[in-house]
Amino acid sequence: MTVRELGEAAGFTLLCGDGDRVLSGEVYCGDLLSVVMGRAPAGCAWVTVMGNVNSVAVAVLTDAACIVLAEGMPLAADALLRAEGKGIPVLGTGLPVFQAAMAAAGALGR
């Protein structure tokens, strides 16, 4: 499943990126960036409330397929530019983190 297909199936909005990246089928939740760096699996949909430029850097380091910003959190302007430059798609949702992760997992057949 691609990031775009995940967004459509889970009701998320594509905030940036082309959405063509294929997901591994894993969903990872976390906001403590140092923990995410060590534990997020490559190709995952990473659900977080952190919409800053450091989150994009962590997504690049972990090779996450996308960032899912939960709870209606905004994507900072500098983070948007960095995500576009690094090819990291970002999805947004108003759902709480747990519900967003469950929606993503359900869409991925987990």
Image: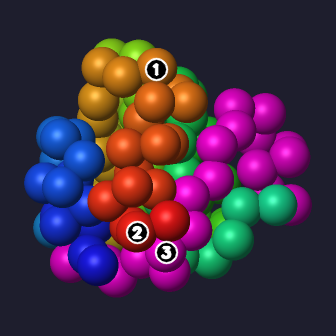
At mark 1, the secondary structure is: loop
User: Does 73 appear above or below 23?
Assistant: above
State the residue at coordinates (18%, 55%). Answer: 9
Q: Earlier in the sequence, mark 2 or mark 1?
A: 1
Rate crowding at label 3 as few (under 14), some (14 to 19) or many (20 or more) other CA atoms within 10 Å.
some
Of label 3 and label 2, which has the lower sequence position? 3
- What residue sits right under mark 3 in the picture? 25
Disc ID at residue 109? 2
Of residue 34 and residue 97, the one placed in the foreground of this image is 97
Measured Cα–Cα span from mark 3 to mark 2: 8 Å
Residue situated in front as seen by the camera: 101 or 87: 101
Q: Which residue is mark 1?
A: 96
Name the quadrant containing residue 42: bottom right
Work out whether 97 lies above or below 104: above
Front-most of 76 and 4? 4
Task: Please tell me whether mark 2 sits on a helix, a strand or a loop.
Answer: loop
Which residue is painted at 86% across and 61% down in the image?
38
In front of the other: label 3 or label 2? 2
Question: Is 24 included in the stretch rendered in magenta?
Answer: yes
Point 40% across, 68% down: residue: 109
Q: Indicate the quadrant containing the N terminus: top left, top right, bottom left or bottom right.
A: bottom left
Numbered marks: total? 3
Residue 104 position in % (x across, y down): 40, 51
| Residue 88 visible here | no
Q: Identify the magenta region.
A: 19-38
Give the answer, above or below, for where 78 lies relative to 87: above
The secondary element bearing badge 3 is classed as: loop
Tell me if residue 49 comes above or below residue 37 in the rendering: above
